[in-house]
Image (spheres, rainbow, N blue to C red):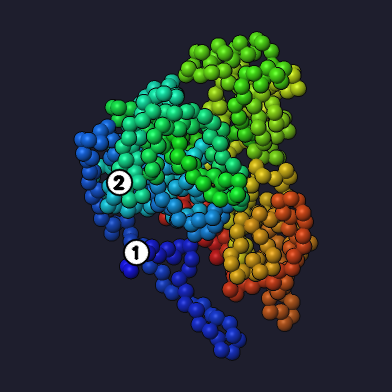
Amino acid sequence: RVAIMSVATHWHALRMAQRDEKTGLWTYKDLPRPQPMEDKELQPLAAPAHALPASLEPANRVWGSFVDVEFTAPFLVDGMRSTRFRGPGLVVDGTRGLVVCDRDTVPIAVGDVSVTVASSVVLPAQVVLLHPTHNFAVVRFDPARLDGAPPPDFPVDEDHYAGVKQLEQGDNVYVVAVTGDQTPVVRRTRVAARTMVATAECAPPRFRCVNVEGVRLDDQPVCLGGVLCTDSGLAVGLWVSVSSQDSSGKDTTNMLGLDIALLRPVVDALRATGRAPPLRSLDVDLWPMRAAAARAMGLSAERIAQAEAEASASFKRTPQLLYVAGLLAPNTPAAGLLHAGDVLLEYDGRPVDNVSQLAVVSAQSVDLVVLRDSREITLRVPTTELDAMETRRVVHWCGALVQKPYRAVLEQVRRLPSSVYISCTLYGSPANCYGLRPGMWIVEVEGRPVSTLDQFVATLQELRLNCCKLPNSTGLRYVRVTVVNKSLVTRVLSLRVDNHYWPPWQLELDADSPSGWKTIPQL
């Protein structure tokens, strides 16, 4: 068989190993890395658009905006189980090279992204934004590498893009999507249901889509994803793959449609400033509640009449209220004010009738009226800023990949032991052999408390320096590490340090690097 393999030396060094017969150690020699071509040496490549047959109308209106997105993760951080992902992307701004795709295609920030235009030109890209609650990501490629005009922006229905309209049960739509071999799929169908997106907490913890409504179709095609559009080819929704797990812990994916209006705040900010917009959250998992259930909890007849009036005035919806199903972070200001079971009635003086009002907000605090214990309570709730990249630093030590706990981890713990979280242990490493496991927190090293990554790195540097000062020292050998697991059970482990085969290093986010990350060889 013949296969094409991509060789990336910016994550893993290209080295030659040779055994030293005297010591028994394998010594490494760094080999020259392939030098990337200079920008002036790169010739722009043509990516001619291919029209679809007339029988596939109205797909031609949006087909030119489709690209193929591939993502490769060098390490299993942020709860990843796999390293390779692929799916369709849609060009939202061709002049800036902005492409939107689902988070089943680009799940994390640590990795290599490539965008294939017109099935012929492969361009490197960088992750710009990972939406922390909704199921989409934005990547950027350099349109100057294309000979000619970049792919066109995919056309949108302005009323749906502005949020004036949204997809409802019974609406007629066209699905324009692609299969695994990039074959177009076009199907006319109807919206079967509009419901809240339900995803389960995963093990190991990873991103899950929350606080958003999605639509299902009568006749859903088998595909990787695409767009929902009108009979004139204007997009009204994204057709995306949503990742989750079933009750047995097996990974699952479901296809559903998301309103196109979810993209507008992000795309408008990227166009205006070139940066992701500030995203803030109440850190609660919201879920709909029927008016009858709210009445049983003590909601007044006046409030129910108000909900019915709001429902009749917008989107043909039945009366629906929202309540707090759970907290997404245990140590935020909102977690100390909002309780599971609270029914949300007002948000900054306006009735709460749609989850999109509260899923992501821009204000540093919001005024809420909630129903709790049959009484209405007014609260001013501070919001929490969400990181559009989630992870910005990874530390490797003795085969353990350590990072700050990301959002999905915070959702699954009652109390945060520290900010030194083990995301992965590499097979055969000291960390793997001596009992460090993914999902543990390091709280002490040699009796020294470590609560942040900076403290962890500083402690390792101090121990290594002190050991080297000892006479006849050959290097630090065993280290006592105190860890806490998800159930808050504490253990003390003795780990044999091996800096020869498992040298320490760090990854840090770096926008100037081609991959978006830089490697710091030593701690």
Q: Is residue 480 above or below residue 126?
A: below
Residue at 29% over, 52% down: 121
Question: Residue 437: x, y in percent?
Answer: 66, 60
Residue at 29% over, 39% down: 63
* Image quarter hosting the C terminus: bottom right
Which residue is more in the foreground, 337 or 203? Answer: 203
Residue at 25% over, 55% down: 43
Question: Residue 145: x, y in percent?
Answer: 30, 50
Q: Which residue matches tag 2?
A: 183
Q: Residue furthest bottom?
A: 22
Mark 2 to mark 1 CA distance (whole Å)? 21 Å
Alpha-carbon neighbours of circle 1 within 10 Å: few (<14), some, or many (≥20)? Answer: few
- Residue 116 visible (yes or no): no
Dot 2 and dot 1 residues touching (CB under 8 Å): no
Which residue is more in the foreground, 41 or 137? Answer: 137
Q: Which residue matches tag 1?
A: 4
Q: Secondary structure at mark 1?
A: loop
Question: Residue 439: x, y in percent?
Answer: 66, 54
Amino acid found under the numbered disc labelled 1: Ile
Toward which corner of the image does residue 263 lie, by quadrant? top left
Toward which corner of the image does residue 450 lie, by quadrant? bottom right
Q: Is residue 58 above or below residue 81?
A: above
Q: Residue furthest front?
A: 219
